[in-house]
Structures are given as structure tokens and as C-alpha cells.
Image: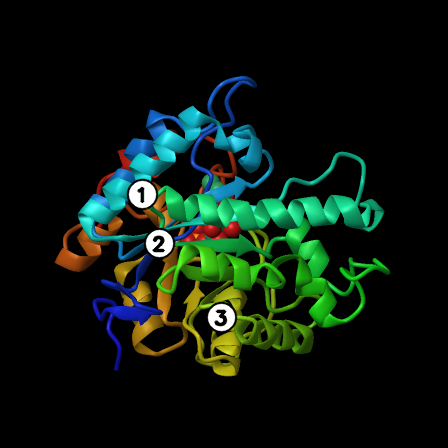
Amino acid sequence: MPLITTPLTVRDRTIKNRITQLPMVPFPFIEDGKDYYNTQHLHHYARAAENGAGLIIVQSTRVEGVTREQGMWTPGSRSILERIAENARLSGATIMIQLSIEPEQGKDINQWSTEAVLEKQNELKEAALKARELGFHGVEYHFAHGFTLCQFMDAGANRRTDQFGGSLENRCRIVTDILPEVRAGAGDDFIISARMGEFTPTSEEGIATARHLEQCGMDMLSVSFGMTVPEGPVPEGFEFSPVTHSAHVIKQAVSVPVIGAFGIRTPEQAKGLVEKEYADLAGLGRAMLADPRFAANLLHGTPYHPCISCKNCSWFTNTLRCPARKLPETA
Ligand SMILES: Cc1cc2nc3c(=O)[nH]c(=O)nc-3n(C[C@H](O)[C@H](O)[C@H](O)COP(=O)(O)O)c2cc1C
């Protein structure tokens, strides 16, 4: 039986335990013209690494501008990312970064020209290679939460008639086409993964997509729908949310490791998820914001600050203001 402390090898890389900090945007956006990544991010991710998380996935990072040193890839931002990766490596954590593409104001993906998609595709590849250069162990392509890559994958949203629409293969092509080049450039031990939902748009499609992504060379999958979870029934006795159940469904369909997430608030839940083999890695989001020492407290059995589910933490709110951090710890 795997334990939360059991190492997991993905390609040639061993993740030291199953505790995963999910990608989360922890601070508000800064003014235009400034570097996106700053010392707040440096401290935020260093804390997660020092406190024992086995895998840390840095927040959604838009690939636009990567080849021109613009957007989230200015020299200042890149130097912070490089230090984030270095800190994690020094603490023995595996560090990845989530890559996404920016929605185009007023246009859905069906209105993008083929040339525009090819340009995004190139940036998705270049960003992965840049991540490798900056010292990251891998990337996670953000195919979830209805965002742009999710719309490509989703047969319900993608009505394109070029090579990026139609069949499942075509709908995933924006990323799957570049995987051989990313692999060749980033090396054998670089982890390439995808975050995806089960119901995009149906469970059958989600399962088929997961299998296809695995066949195309994805090393790991993270299963998530977003922050609002449909009230769905889960089988009797399944003690986690429908999102976590989806991870279990996907895990049964593929042989690569799967990250399960949503509403994992206590050390017992994180351990149970792994021990019952519902998922290979326990993905923690708000639990880690409420207590940046959550991983250490879990590993040592020490009291922690539990997330109080206040629902005030959404994207771009300042994590340092999380009210749970001020409340007494729970044994
Ligand atoms: C403040 C905040 C920022 C988030 N940013 C991202 C993100 O950048 N990329 C992503 O895939 N999910 C993002 N999420 C979703 C989380 O990764 C996670 O799936 C979600 O919070 C559910 O897990 P939890 O119940 O453990 O918090 C964010 C969530 C929060 C609370």
C-alpha cells in the first residue's frame, strides 16, 4: 500500500513524497510594466519547499511573450523563477510550472486564425524549454477549468474546421504536436503533464482524452474542474468530492500517475487519498495557503492551521491575508 511518504518515480525523477502543492495564483496581479514574478513569489514557493512538499507546481504562467522576454517572462521575472526552482531543488522538492495561454479579448478560440494557433503552439513549446533552462523539473499544461487550452480540448467548445478542431487527436494537437520537440530539447527526465477535467464535455470523452494524452507522451495527469464543483453523486462510501472521484476514474483508465484534488483539508484526508489508491499524489490547494507549513505538520504529526473554507480566497487575492493563519492550530 503506498503511503503519503512513499517516494514516486516519474520518468527518471523521484518525487520524495506524495504531498503536492497545486498550482495557485497567490498574489494580485501587479501594475503593467513591472516584472510579474517578484520576491513575494520567491518566499511563497521557498516556504512550501522547505516545509517538505514532495512536488510543487508553480501557478498558471501564460506563455505569451516567452520568446521576446515579455509578459510573464521578462528578465526580472525569469530570474525569480530561476531562484524559485533552485530553492526547491536545494530542499529536495520536485518543482514544475503550469503553462497556460491567454484568452484573446472578445474572441473565442473558434475565431483564431490557424497562424495565430501555430504561434501559440510555438510559445507553448518554447516556454517548456525555457522552464527547463531555468531549472524546473517539468511543466503542466493547463487543459482544465474552461480556460483556453481546455476550450481546444472540449468537443463542446471547439468548432474549428482546421487541423486544431474535429477529432480528439486534432483537439489536443495544440500541445500533443510539440511533445516530441519538448522531450528532445528538455531531456529524458523532464516531466510533462496535463491538468484536465473528466467531464470535457462527457466522462467518456474525458477518459478517452486522458488515454490519448498518455499515448502522446504525457508523464502525469492532474484532474480538476475548477473552483465550483457540480453537486454530483459519488459512489457510496467514497468520502471525497466529485472532483477527487474523477481523479480516481482517470487513474483507473491510465497507467501514468494521477494527482487527485479538491477539498483535501486534513492530513488524514491527504493520507487516505493515497493509501486507498484513489490517486497517486495528494493535491493540496487552500490547505497549503491556510498553513504554509501544512506538509511539515502532516509529516511530523504536529498541529496545523486548517482552511476554514471562508471562500474569500480566489485568484489574485493576497494569500498572506488568509484568515485561517491567524486562528489557533488544530491538533
Ligand atoms: C487562490 C487560488 C488560485 C488558484 N490558481 C490556480 C492556477 O493558477 N491554476 C490552476 O490550475 N488552479 C488554480 N487554482 C485551483 C487549485 O489548484 C485547486 O484545484 C483548488 O483550489 C481546489 O483544491 P483545494 O480544495 O485543495 O483548494 C487556484 C485556487 C486558489 C484558491
Q: Secondary structure at mark 2?
A: loop
Label ID, residue 274: none
Circle nearer the viewer, 3 or 1: 1
Proximity of marks 3 and 1: CB atoms separated by less than 8 Å: no
Q: Amino acid at mark 3?
A: Ala
Please name the residue that numbered disc 1 is placed on. Answer: 85
* Kind of residue indicated by mark 1: Ala
Could you say where residue 82 lies in the image, as x and y percent from the top left?
34, 37
Q: Earlier in the sequence, mark 1 or mark 2?
A: 1
> Mark 3 highlights which residue?
247
In the rendered structure, find residue 137 and report the number of the disc placed on it.
2
Which is nearer the N-term, disc 3 or disc 2?
A: 2
Q: CA distance from mark 3 to mark 2?
A: 23 Å
Q: Is residue 218 above or below residue 99?
A: below
Residue appearing at x 17%, y 58% in the figure: 299
Q: What type is the residue that disc 2 sits on?
A: His
Query: Dot 3, crowdedness within 10 Å: few (<14), some or many (≥20)?
Result: many
Crowding around mark 2 (Cα neighbors within 10 Å: few <14, some 14 to 19, many 20+) is many
- The reply to whether the residue tagged 3 has its Cβ within 8 angstroms of ligand 1 is no
In contact (CB < 8 Å): disc 3 and disc 2: no
Which residue is found at the position 83% from the left and 58% from the top? Answer: 160
Number of disc labels: 3
Kindly identify the residue that appears in the image at 77 percent across and 71 percent down. 167
In this orientation, does residue 292 appear?
no
Q: Nearer the viewer, residue 79 or 263?
A: 79
What colour scheme governs how the chains and residues are painted in the rendered image of this protein? rainbow
Horizontal side of 45 relative to 125 (left or right) equals left
CA–CA distance between discs 1 and 2? 8 Å
Q: 299 or 141, which is in the foreground?
A: 141
Q: Position of residue 181 (x, y in %)?
A: 53, 59
Decide if residue 301 is on the left or right side of residue 305: left
